[in-house]
Image (cartoon, rainbow, N blue to C red):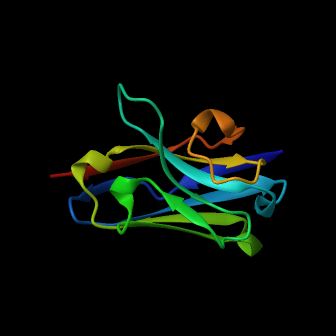
Amino acid sequence: QVQLVESGGGLVQAGGSLRLSCVASGRAASNYVIGWFRQAPGNERDFVAAISRDGSETRYKDSVKGRFTISRDNGKNTVILQTNSLKPEDTAVYYCAANSVGILLSNANLYGFWGQGTQVTVSS
């Protein structure tokens, strides 16, 4: 099994940036596709981005393309979500998750391992 811990959230003004980190422990992160999801109050958990095991493939939610970048360093068991040009509608708790299926899935139900989340708040 893998354990995931997110960090890097905070309060930022619109147009600002945050660098979210997801650090894996236990089984090596390189065994998993890693996804980032977010959940705003009253909403379902929503796909944001995913990255393949070796980092060669990525997938993004349409509304974050060109603003967010997902990357990974398997040597450090870390996945980064760089968020730029943040908007108030990006406000949510951001979670990283791992799936062993090997496909860049957008369905949260198909990810078996989750972190505790990190709050991102974007003020207007």
In depth, the one of 14 and 69 nearer the eye is 69
**x 35%, y 29%: residue:** 41
Q: Is residue 65 left or right of residue 27?
A: left
Q: Position of residue 70 (x, y in %)?
A: 53, 66
Task: Give the image location of residue 102, x and y in percent.
Answer: 75, 54
Whether residue 68 sits left or right of residue 112 in the image: it is: left
Could you tell me residue 76's position as x and y percent?
Answer: 72, 71
Question: In the visual, does 55 lie left or right of 121?
Answer: right
Residue at left offset 70%, top offset 53%? 103
Total tally of numbered discs in the picture: 0
Residue 99 percent location from the top left of the image: 72, 47
Q: Measured along the vertical axis of the image, is residue 56 above or below residue 59?
A: below
Q: Nearer the viewer, residue 84 or 120?
A: 84
In the rendered view, tell whether residue 69 sits above or below residue 111: below
Q: Which residue in the rendered view is the most extreme toward the top?
A: 42
Q: Quadrant of residue 1?
A: top right
Q: Between residues 74 and 9, which one lies in front from this camera angle?
A: 74
**Side of 14 relative to 34 (left or right):** left
